[in-house]
Image: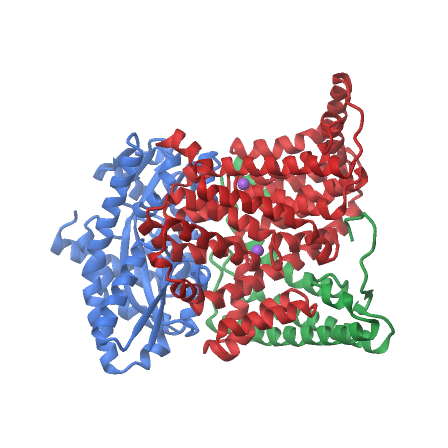
Amino acid sequence: MDLGTTIIIVMLGLLLLGFPMMVPLASASVIAFAFFMPIPHQIIIQQMVSGISPVALIAVPMFIFAADIVTKGHTASRLIDLAMTFVGHVRGGLAVTTALGCTLFGAVSGSTQATVVAMGGPLRPKMLEAGYKDSFTMALIINASDIAFLIPPSIGMIVFGVVGKVSIGELFIAGIGPGVLILLLFSAYSVWYAKHNDIPTIPRRTWAERAKAVVNAGPAIMFPVLIVGGIYLGWVSPTEVAAVSVIYAIILEVVIFRSVKWSELLEIARSTGLITAVVFILVGAGTTFSFVISFAQIPQAVIGALALDSAGPYTILFAISIAFFIGCMFVDPIVVILVLTPIFMPLVNNAGIDPILVGTLVTLQVAIGSATPPFGCDIFTAIAIFRRPYAEVIKGTPPFICMLLLVAVLLIFFPQIATFLPETAFR
Amino acid sequence: EEWKFAIEESTGDVQDLYAQKFKELVEEKSGGDVDVTIYTYGQLGTENDITELTASGAIQFSNASPGHLGTFVPEIQVFGVPYLLSQNNDVNKDILSKSPTIYKGLSKDFESKGLKLYTMYPEGEMVWTTKKKVEAPKDFDGVKFRVMTSPILIDSYKSFGADPVALPWGEVYSGLQTSVIDAQVNPIFFIESAKFYEVTDYLIYAGQQQYTTTVVTNDAFYKGLSDDRKALLKDVKAELDDYIFKAQADLNAKALDKIKEAKPDIKVIKLDADQRAKFEEASKGVGDKLVDEVGGDTQQVLTDLRDEISKKEKELGEM
Amino acid sequence: MAINTVANVVARLCFSSSLFFSEELNTFLIILVTFVGISEAARMGRHIRMSAFSDMLGPVASKVLMIIVTLGTALLLFILAYYSIDYVAGLVKTNRLTPSLRIPMYLTVLIVPFGLTVTGIQFVLAALTNILKPGVHLSYRVEDTYEDNLDTHL
Ligand code: NA
Ligand code: NA
């Protein structure tokens, strides 16, 4: 049996038997090194360590920490109460707020995992209180966080731009169209869902009441201002904003509101460390797995077998969509972009496809893949944060994944969704 | 027989041009007995990972640039010393491809890490992209300059008068866009492919440094090769020395044209000898500081290289 | 980690310079947190797994399966721990230093074999608990259930 077939069988078997997720991922590598690749086995560890070392990843634990602090304290609920005074009377208002919140936070943090944590942590309890089902709530949070990849700044687009030799500025602008489209679709679905399940609303507030809520939110309102403003005004980089939000969360909750004790901070830090470890060990194992796949040149073999080099533009675009989507179901999106982009770009250039369209499509697909079972990293993050069984976390995702795939298909047939903005701006 | 060659750059960049030509020549000269497989950036991990992979024998060849190679062979960091190399690139070509200081003097240091130095070549001049005009060290006052996390680069840019900033490369573009940083430095072909010119206004050639890279091979692998194969590798290297020197110059020239076409109002500044002298003067202490910090044979390597370079400059001219 | 990065931002904004070791320090902290954290996660039964199949089984079968899963996981972790000792030994041998802090590189990954081994032991303990005690156990202190509350903390 060849390497590819063997590891797929082993991985699926171990997965279904209920082994911890790191076991199928790491076993595939151990087997590949032991029986198929005559190279030193310590490289498994090298790749695992190097997979969790990128500087950009440190934003994730810091956002987890900040989100935990503001959820335990008052900031998160004050901000949500504030939002509710504006949208609480609309059916599905809270769900739409959640979708919008995830989009905005994701836009600046650039990390889908950090968004799941930072927005999902405080918003999920409120949605459950309001009567939304947990499966819907978790699926909405996970998938709305995906939009993070499409709205600038987006690390996925930067990596694609450099590897694929495409203008990053144009990519950034091209992502906005599909990003907004997804947000609209999710919002429409949320409103439909709320109507269908008869989620109660609260009475409409007067503007006086809303003004009062703004005052009540007090320094908490500075939190999103600091994060969004900090990035766009150039005070801090996206990684650094995570650190700034930790410090601001501590100042707010421990010093100003006094809602979290110093001793509790230690407990929160411990919980953050645990969640980080559970997610990062999978990022590390996934990196090793991807090393095996690219070392053995499996993607090249698959593309060769499919005779894609003579295919037309639509076939290539669908092949790209499927490849990136599947890739991200298993390993970190950035790694997938690095491995697959150089393999596909010659095909794209030969077929004369607009690379900006490809970049947008790839970014969309890696976002979808990250939220798709079995190994999508946003799903791991959600399980680690929300502490719900795997099956329940993924139960509500199909409608969202269908909407995202619909956008991908629309993008292939109507590239103007992406290319309209950059064409007006640049060409 | 399969030789695996991992590079630190993407398809179409200088290291890829080298690796592709290497593949072509090796496969042709070995009569098809050797297949060369090329892995581009990120496919087998980070720059550090691929050097480790070569050292452990998992792959046979990889590119390693001084910044990363410095953790294996610290002396190689001398190539980060500003104004060490000549303004005459023919001199640099000769030094990088033949220097006994590099190929003989440092070979023990490479061997002790499981590596053998195969070749060294320039990828083009390191060009500053900035938001304001910089023609003298005083113009760098308050400029947040992104450099790679390497102590020698940090020292250099401090000595030039800038404020060096560490930022992962994935954040450089948006960092320039939002002014978290004001400037960065890279060869022009990389500035083109990473689109840094989109978010800066000046391209400044200050002549302080060529971006150099090495190709290393696994030491045990090399020693185990037949004499035929060793001779083949030697021939290929000689041919590639000429090829890559021209190829990188063409690629960089083309990249500059592309930048000018994509952004006609970009200002390209070439510092003259007087202006360069000011920066050279300012950075005089950087080499000594490196010697202090790294120790080992660094002093010797630096002195020998300076001798070799000035001898070659007398032969070929300074410019 | 946050303090380190914020120190970096403050240093850059106020003192116009950067703490260059912050990058290396952060990477080191991430490795530390991950490999200490996985053993803690094993102790708390928090590793992510897909339980759909075992949830369908009867009590005896799922107990047997849990014993296989915990022992298998422990085996894998011990194999990885063994590999990681080789990895650390390789770094010791080549005596490489980190670029900014100039400390030996092997120190930054010393925690890896330790964390993997301790995590392996946690899974052995979980297997023993399943063998010796009634019920199905994810770890020696946690039974296989998800608590039904809204608390998102530990
Ligand atoms: Na973003
Ligand atoms: Na993933």
| Colour given to chain C in the rendered image | green
Nearer-the-camera pick, C58 or B268? C58
| Position in image of residue B23 (x %, y %) | 28, 67
| Position in image of residue C33 (x %, y %) | 65, 58
Q: Is residue B3 above or below residue A225?
A: below
Nearer-the-camera pick, A394 or B32? A394
The quadrant where ligand 1 appears is top right
| Colour given to chain A in the rendered image | red
The residue at the point 29 percent across, 75 percent down is B34
Seen in the image, is B290 located left or right of residue A48?
left
* Chain (blue): B
Q: How many marks?
A: 0
Q: Is residue A230 above or below residue B79?
A: above
Snapshot quadrant of residue A286: bottom right
Seen in the image, is A19 located left or right of residue C110?
right
The residue at the point 33 percent across, 43 percent down is B192
